Amino acid sequence: MTDPAPEPPRAIPPGQHLVQELRVQHYGPVPRFRPDSWRLTINGATEDGKERRLDMEEFSALPTTTVLADLHCVTKWTVLDNLWSGVAARTILELVPPAADVTHVMAWAEYGYSATLRLEDVASPSAILATALDGKPLVPEHGFPVRLIVPHLYSWKGPKWMWGLEYLTEPVRGFWEERGHHLTGDVWREERYSYQE
């Protein structure tokens, strides 16, 4: 009897190299969390035209899920098999539906940081508003209390310290998109820079 064939190596996206741990990279200092004032705000072109705000208690009461997903930084490093837990992004889309003509979503975070995403990317089954990593609550350096994870996009599309989703009927460039990064940011297509659009 022969030994089974070894597992083939995991594919990583083009232009990326493997690292063992998530690196701490972000814009601005780590903010202090204020649980009494934190709200997840969903606004813009909502189906009913109304804004919805969820405080931490309401957000924490939403159904949770777990996603095993890789994280890819546009600076060319990748960490495989991170276990993210939190609220599926599509749960928010179901709770506060976007209007029929919405095509994009702006994710908002501390210090005015923003990231433009296509609606289809936010609706992906693997997109998650993460509150925990590998079975432990997120630490502030990795985005506590909420970090958006969209595994097939570069990680700048997943803001740390997130507090809002704004529905858009046309693309509006977010923080890094205004500074020369790609509007979509698909890691498998190496969509790093705006000149590639």
Image: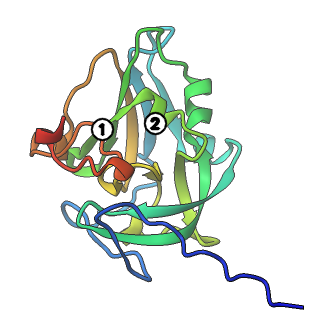
The residue identified by callout 1 is 184
Residue 139 visible in the displayed image: no
Whole-number angstrom distance, CA of label 1 to CA of label 2: 9 Å
Q: Quadrant of residue 85?
A: bottom right
Q: Residue at x 26, y 69 (%)?
A: 25
Q: What's the residue type where badge 1 is placed?
A: Thr
Q: Is residue 79 above or below residue 41?
A: below
Question: Where residue 136 appears, x then y in whole percent?
Answer: 60, 73
Q: Residue at x 40, y 16 (%)?
A: 102
Q: What's the residue type where badge 2 is placed?
A: Asp
> Would residue 93 be found to the left or right of residue 31 on screen?
right
The numbered mark, 1 or 2, whose residue comes first in the sequence reads: 2
Q: Is residue 123 above or below residue 144?
A: above
Q: Residue at x 52, y 48 (%)?
A: 129
Q: Is residue 171 above or below residue 137?
A: above
Q: Which mark, residue 164?
A: none
Question: Where residue 177 appears, x then y in whole percent?
Answer: 17, 41
Closer-to-camera residue (111/16): 16
Report the quarter where the N terminus lies. bottom right
Q: Are marks 1 and 2 in contact (CB under 8 Å)?
A: yes
Q: Which mark, residue 121?
A: 2
The image's colouring method is rainbow
Total marks drawn? 2
> Would residue 162 be found to the left or right of residue 63 on screen?
left
Residue 61 visible in the displayed image: yes
> Would residue 178 be found to the left or right of residue 93 on screen?
left
Question: Where residue 33 appears, x then y in whole percent?
Answer: 39, 60
Say what secondary structure mark 2 lies in.
Answer: helix
